[in-house]
Image (cartoon, rainbow, N blue to C red):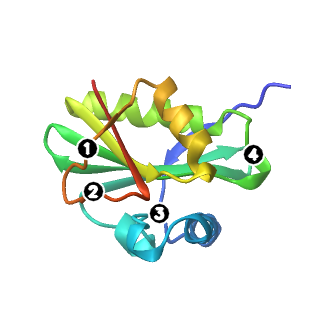
Amino acid sequence: MTVSFVVIEDEPSRPVVAELLKEHLSNMAKHSPPESAHALDVKGLQAKNVTFWSVWSGAELAGCGALKELTPYHGEIKSMHTSSSYLRRGVASEIMKHLMNVASKRGYRRLSLETGSAEAYVPARYLYARFGFEVCGPFSHYQEDPHSTFMTREL
């Protein structure tokens, strides 16, 4: 069965969205020490240099993702998360395509991200690699961290 998704620019403080973000932060806390958890909370996702999107299947929230502008030519993917009821149904690919399209339209030349290095993050790292991201060193404000994997790609 094919599921169709709609991606909308959204407000992270909207209750149903905030609940999904709470799940995202909770999952990260299970697999990364606090000093290595770099996910943005609702307030961080409301910063002027961050744009947030949610992914919907009809009236159901399926996932989310955000794009943070680091420079006029470099963006960072933030807060990629799929609702547990939509895992392995194409939500992450849908938001990745959307974020990469927006980044290209904005004129970014590079798109980077930070994700965990633990076993729990293998599916995320695999997804990013499928979209052309390669492991790199820390970028922007990040420091070398054994609990982090940094990835980047040119657009």
* Image position of 30 with respect to 89: above or below: below
- Amino acid on which disc 3 is placed: Glu
Residue at the image point whose x is 61% and y is 71% from the top: 26
Residue at the image point whose x is 74% and y is 51% from the top: 59
* Callout 1 touching callout 2 (CB < 8 Å): yes
Q: Mark 1 vs mark 2: which is more N-terminal?
A: 1
* Callout 3 touching callout 1 (CB < 8 Å): no
Q: Which residue is under mark 4?
A: 86
- Amino acid on which disc 4 is placed: Tyr
Considering the numbered disc 3 on the image, is that residue within a helix, a strand or a loop? loop
Q: Mark 1 vs mark 4: which is more N-terminal?
A: 4
Would residue 78 be visible to someone looking at this image?
Answer: no
Q: Which residue is under mark 3?
A: 11
Please identify the quarter of the rendering in which residue 104 is found.
top left
Q: Residues within 10 Å of mark 1 (few under 14, many from 20)?
A: some
Q: Mark 3 vs mark 2: which is more N-terminal?
A: 3
Q: Residues within 10 Å of mark 4 (few under 14, many from 20)?
A: some
Of the two numbered discs 4 and 2 in the rendering, the one whose residue sits closer to the viewer: 2
Q: Mark 4 vs mark 2: which is more N-terminal?
A: 4
- Between 46 and 143, the residue placed more toward the observer is 143
* Callout 4 touching callout 2 (CB < 8 Å): no
